[in-house]
Every structure is written in structure tokens, then in C-alpha cells.
Image: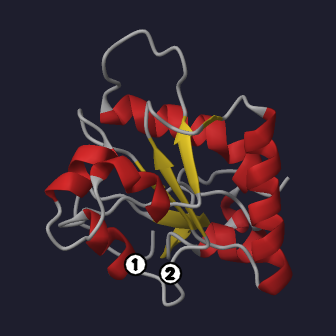
Amino acid sequence: IDRVLTPGIRCTVQMDMKSYGTPGKKHLKGKVVSPSAPREHDGTYWGYSVRMASSIKSIFDEAPYESGYDLKIGTSERGDLSVDDELFKEKINNKIEQISSSSSFQHALIVLGGVAGIEECVDADETINISGNDSRSLFDLWLNICEYQGSRTIRTEEAVLIGLSRLCPFVLPV
């Protein structure tokens, strides 16, 4: 690559296509680019971003995007809808259509609760003036992404994979 990086960090490399298939070449060449380059240049899905927030309120107030989030999804085992419900499909398609008609859909937020759920996080957040039982009001969609989970809780690393795999068909353009 075109620079020396700290070992162990994640980076996105744009490969030099001239390096491929050249007889006698032992190494391919490339340059380090922004992680958003694949999405910006050709619309390729290139992963998700994770950020820590000090409170539920700060998730929304400190959004890293100037215009905030286009679509806010809260996940809870007490969600109003399941991804499998026809009403969910109708609601998410309507929401994305509504966003797309006024601007382009760019930023979706998926909030995963801890062991006791988003509701407990809302109850613990002294900077927000709603109760945990009203957590759904913070989101465009309040979903149960894993109906019939068969256990008391789902680990966060499992919830990320389950949530993204269940929601990607609806939020990523085909």
C-alpha cells in the first residue's frame, strides 16, 4: 500500500487493477482510501459504523451527520412489529419512500438495548423526559427483530448480526 499503518487497524484499500494478472508480479499494489469510498464511488455496501453514546438522548443529539438520521429503528423483545409482519414491510417501505421523495435516504440508526432493553436505558437517562414504557416514541420503527428467540436475552454481538441480516433487504437499494 501507499503508506505505513499501525498494525491491527482496519483500513480500506483500493487495489491497483494494473497489478492483477501481470506475469512475474509477486505483490499487488493499492492505496489506502476512506472507508466510505466504496459506497460513494459505486454504491457498494461496506459495513456499518458503531459509536458509543453516553446516554439515550445523546444518541440523537450527537449524531455524526449534520441532518441526523433518516430512519431510526429501536429494537426490543416488546417491539410493536416483527420484521416478518406485513405491516412492517408496509411501514418501512412507506417511510423510505417518504424520505426519498424529499431527499436521498442516507443514514439509518439501529439501537440495540442492553440485557434489560432500551426501556431500562431510557428510565436511567435523567436528561430525557419520557419513561421507559414510552421508548418507542423515540423511533420511527419499534421492532422485535428476533421473535421466538427462545432465551431471555440475545447477546449484543448476536443482535447486531441478526438485526442487520433481517433489515438489510429493506434499507439497502437493490
What SS does tag 2 mark? loop
Label 1 crowd (10 A; few <14 / some 14-19 / many >=20): some
Q: Earlier in the sequence, mark 2 or mark 1?
A: 1
Residue closer to the observer: 141 or 168: 141
Location of residue 99 (image quadrant): bottom right
Residue closer to the observer: 108 or 13: 108
Q: Which residue is mark 1?
A: 63
The x, y position of residue 49, in whole percent, is 43, 61
Residue 13 visible (yes or no)? yes
Residue closer to the observer: 119 or 41: 119
Residue closer to the observer: 143 or 4: 143
Amino acid carrying label 2: it is Gly
* 34 in relation to 116, above or below: below
Amino acid carrying label 1: it is Ala
* 141 in relation to 76, above or below: below
User: What residue sits 42% from the left and 34% below the top?
Assistant: 159
Determine the CA span between mark 2 and mark 1. 5 Å
User: What residue sits 80% from the left and 85% below the top?
Assistant: 102
Would residue 35 appear left or right of 23 to someone viewing this image? left
Would residue 171 appear left or right of 142 to someone viewing this image? right
Pointers 2 and 1 in contact (CB under 8 A)? Answer: yes
